[in-house]
Image: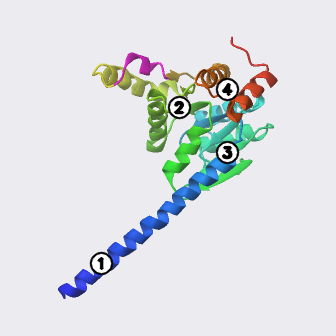
Amino acid sequence: MQHNKNDLIKKYTKEIKSGDVWSVFKIIADFVKGFDELGELGPSVTIFGSARTNKNETYYKKAQKLASLLGSRGFNVMTGGGPGIMEAANKGAHKHDVESIGLNIDLPFEQVANPYTSKELSFDYFFSRKVMLVKYSIAYVIFPGGYGTLDELFEALTLIQTRKVTGVKVFIVGVDFYSPLMDFIKTKLLVHGMIDEEDIDLISLTDDLECIANDIEESLLEQIRVLKEVGLGDTSYYKSLLEFSLDKNIKKK
């Protein structure tokens, strides 16, 4: 009996190891696909938010309006590709001559791709998808959402705080929704020394969509400056941002 039990344990362990090895290839495939499809994308803004927001809600309409505003200024719009806020953003960008990108995730429930994307990619893993959502954008806009949205918000803030990404701004839409969170950050994290005063400045909380669009243009110019400053002025990414700013006549206000 003990012999049979040991055989079962060995068999199960072998299957786990085999599955782990196969997962490595799936992870690599996720990254290769993302780098290949998004590497030459041009200036983009990623919009995060709940998949559960319905079409009649204020934040759905605001996400659609902001994405349309950004699209009219030539910015590509990137989302997680699902329903709710993601659908609203893709819908707003879809009517303009820009890329409306959806980076979907393979889930056994809930996440169905919305029909408003001009470019759609599907990922097996949340972490590889999240890399792509932040890597190729010059700004991140956070609408109301649940655990997933908060995870994306704090991931973005951590990357900027630790300077893994530079020249990128985080905008939070929903003053009423997010004010308690901002209070927690200021009265708990800051007061207890968990973050610095300058870390508060990484976040811009506002419901003014026009202001966000203007600030994103400023963020583009800042990223161009930073790239040149760190010696990346000869890269194709730098050149694409510079060409875009000149073509759209974006100037520091």
Estimate the spatial distance between the alpha carbons at disc 2 and disc 4, rounded to whole Å.
16 Å
Disc 4 residue type (three-letter): Gly
Mark in front: 3 vs 4: 4
Vertical arrangement, residue 96 with respect to residue 197, above or below: below
Q: Amino acid at mark 1?
A: Lys
Specify which label sits upstream in the sequence, 4 or 1: 1
In the picture, the disc for residue 165 is 2
Secondary element under disc 1, as helix, strand or loop, is: helix
* Inter-mark Cα distance, 2 to 3: 17 Å
> Which circle's residue, 1 or 3, is located before the other in the chain?
1
Q: Say what secondary structure mark 2 lies in.
A: loop
Instruction: Find disc 1 in the rendering and name its residue.
Output: 10
- Relative horizontal placement of residue 199, taking residue 28 as reference (left or right): left
Q: Residues within 10 Å of mark 3 (few under 14, many from 20)?
A: some
Q: What x and y, as percent, mark residue 163?
A: 48, 28
Q: Are marks 1 and 2 in contact (CB under 8 Å)?
A: no
Residue under numbered circle 4: 233
* Quarter the C terminus occupies: top right
Left or right for 152, reference 97: left
CA gap, disc 4 and disc 1:
55 Å
Rendered location of residue 201, percent (x, y): 47, 18
Q: Which residues are magenta?
A: 195-202
